[in-house]
Amino acid sequence: MSTAIALLVVLWLGLTLYTLLGGADFGAGFWDLVAGGTRRGAARRELIEHSIGPVWEANHVWLILVVTLFWTAFPPAFASFASTLYIPLTVAALGIIGRGAAFAFRKASESLAEQRLYGATFAASSVLTPFFLGTAVGGVASRRVPSGVAAGDIWTSWLNPTSIFCGVLAVGVCAYLAAVYLIADARRAGKQVLVAEFRRRALITGVVVGVVALAGVAVLAADAPALYDGLRGQGLPVAAVSIVAGVGSLVLIAVGRYRVVRLTAAVAVAALLWAWAAAQYPLMLPPDLTVDAAAGAPTVLAAVLVALGVGAVLLAPSLIWLFVIFQRTPGAHRAPPSS
């Protein structure tokens, strides 16, 4: 395996972790948005706040890793990507900033009006951010981001059927992951009413996401035929894993196997990302920029790989320990006494 391929794998692992962890945080914001009025949605919002409170900032480490690695290891591809898709990327960045600020300010606010304002900002940003990130992904996947600085159209690169489909799918996937994770958090909090509520939400959202994904096949066939052919070819085995894990997750939720379903739901979403990678490989930016052509100088790649190894030794144990403490500490995410 070449250094460029190794770094691409690390980049995709970082993107996968951000989708699974940061995506679930965005999905929690979606459920905050539809939780109900101030009184009726209080228990749901309290559970959401306690669930994401200790980790929502840490999860953005993976986005920082992805952006930094993309920029450093594959500069021609990054320049093309950022200069063509700067509109959705800017909106997504503003959403991340607004979401984080609103989440922090809502907890510090005392008046109901301020809490509602910050809560609405937090929830709306949690929906808009994954949508616009999804549109950027759709632009790359549908070959609308050619190699070259600002070589693609700054509007049609993300305002197209494939991008809209990817944006909607991203919001749905985030909501589904959050609902699955919140079932387990509600169980640990001893809130059986909330367990039942998020179980129902997870089942409904999972079915909706599945229907959207199936409908998207027709969108890809008409609007992104190269990606469609790739998914039917070398990406098919990985896509099959996503389908099987997704269906299996719905069955596990239905029968109440909430511990196992967190793993199968994560596999379903991760396999979806890797199916895209497999369908597109060896292209970094279709139709003609390959991974090797986009890679930086060999000395730079080697230095980045060494830095990643050192960083992993320092960072991984801390993050693992954070999640272990969060999962095991009694009362770390208590829900309100009423449910």
Image (tube, rainbow, N blue to C red):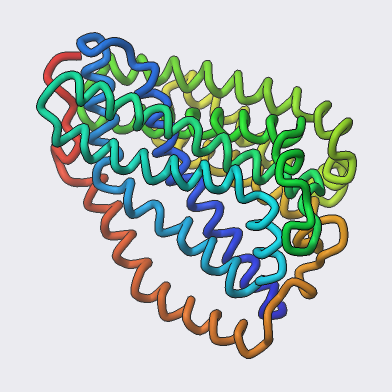
305 above or below 223? below
28 above or below 93? above
In the image, 169: left or right of 234? left
- Residue drawn at point x = 82 percent, y = 34 percent: 220
- Residue drawn at point x = 39 percent, y = 35 percent: 259
Count of numbered tags: 0
- Residue drawn at point x = 54 percent, y = 80 percent: 304
- Residue drawn at point x = 45 percent, y = 18 percent: 201
- Determine which quarter of the picture holds residue 191: top left
In the image, 300: left or right of 102? right
Q: Indicate the position of residue 314 as horizontal and vertical percent values.
A: 34, 74
Q: Indicate the position of residue 42 as horizontal and vertical percent values.
A: 22, 17
Q: Indicate the position of residue 233 as horizontal and vertical percent values.
A: 87, 47
Q: Give the quarter of the figure containing the N terminus.
A: bottom right
Instruction: Looking at the picture, tell me which residue is in the foreground, 59 or 252.
Output: 59
Q: Indicate the position of residue 323 as horizontal and vertical percent values.
A: 30, 52
- Determine which quarter of the picture holds residue 7: bottom right
Q: Give the quarter of the figure containing the C terminus.
A: top left
332 above or below 149? above
Q: Would residue 186 be visible to someone looking at this image?
A: no
Q: Would residue 216 be visible to someone looking at this image?
A: yes
In the image, 135: left or right of 237? left
Instruction: Looking at the picture, tell me which residue is in the foreground, 186 or 130.
Output: 130
